[in-house]
């Protein structure tokens, strides 16, 4: 049978430094592990080894903290979705711009048609005749 998995707690660097200093002062690792609700003393010895080798900065631990890969993948997915949304926005803005150009063109064409009709109804100008319906 395997051991039941316990959730790993993440401790602040200041807490780790305090615990390591207490270990170096002579307190028992087992008592400290119980106080921190750790299942074993292994992690405390790792902290002490890193502290002795590199000081408080070494207690951060190598690599990314547990679960950061999941967070990184979520961040990547969010960035990907944001990028897609930005591309979609840019595409829609181009379409709106093209529609504005088309609208301006047709408004100008309508103005020209209206001006041409007005000229034909001016005094002394022959207007166009209505089409005959058969």
Image: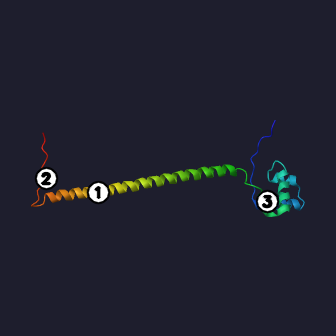
Residue 132 lies in what quarter of the image?
top left
In front of the other: 73 or 108: 108
Tell me which residue sits at (66%, 52%) in the image.
72
Please name the residue shown 79% across and 59% down the image: 59
Q: Nearer the viewer, residue 113 or 20?
A: 113
Res 21 seen here: no
Left or right: 27 with respect to 60? right
SS for dot 3: helix
- The residue lying at 88 percent from left, 58 percent from top is 27
- Whole-angstrom CA distance, mark 1 to mark 2, is 23 Å
Name the side, left or right, on which 57 lies relative to 88.
right
- Quarter of the rendering containing residue 26: bottom right
Extreme residue in the right direction: 26
Q: Earlier in the sequence, mark 1 or mark 2?
A: 1
Q: How many marks overall? A: 3
On the image, the x and y values in percent for residue 42 come to 84, 51
Q: Which mark is residue 59?
A: 3
Q: Which image quadrant is residue 6 in?
A: top right
Query: Given contact means CB atoms under 8 Å apart, are the residues at marks 1 and 2 in contact?
Result: no
Asked if marks 2 and 3 touch (Cβ < 8 Å), the reply is: no
Q: CA distance from mark 2 to mark 3?
A: 93 Å
Q: Position of residue 112 (x, y in %)?
A: 24, 58
Q: Which quadrant is home to the N terminus?
A: top right
Real-space CA distance between mark 1 and mark 3, rounded to the nearest whole angstrom: 71 Å
Mark 2 surroundings: few (<14), some (14-19) or many (≥20) residues within 10 A: few
Give the residue at mark 2.
128
Point out the image quarter for the C terminus. top left
- Indicate the position of residue 95 as horizontal and vertical percent values: 41, 53
Q: Between residues 110 and 46, which one lies in front from this camera angle? A: 110
Q: Of the residues tagged 1 and 2, which is closer to the observer?
A: 2
On residue 107, the disc is: 1
Neighbourhood count class around disc 1 (C-alpha, 10 Å): few under 14, some 14–19, many 20 upward: few
């Amino acid at each position: 049978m395997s051991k039941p998995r316990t959730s790993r707690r993440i401790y602040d660097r200041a807490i780790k430094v305090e615990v390591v200093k207490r270990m170096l002062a002579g307190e028992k690792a087992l008592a400290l592990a119980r106080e921190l609700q750790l299942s074993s003393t292994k992690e405390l010895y790792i902290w002490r080894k890193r502290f002795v080798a590199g000081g408080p900065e070494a207690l951060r631990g190598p690599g990314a903290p547990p679960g950061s890969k999941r967070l990184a993948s979520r961040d990547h997915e969010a960035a990907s979705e944001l990028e897609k949304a930005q591309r979609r926005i840019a595409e829609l803005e181009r379409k709106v711009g093209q529609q504005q150009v088309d609208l301006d063109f047709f408004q100008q064409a309508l103005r020209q048609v209206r001006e041409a009709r007005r000229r034909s109804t001016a005094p002394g100008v022959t207007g166009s005749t209505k089409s005959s319906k058969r």
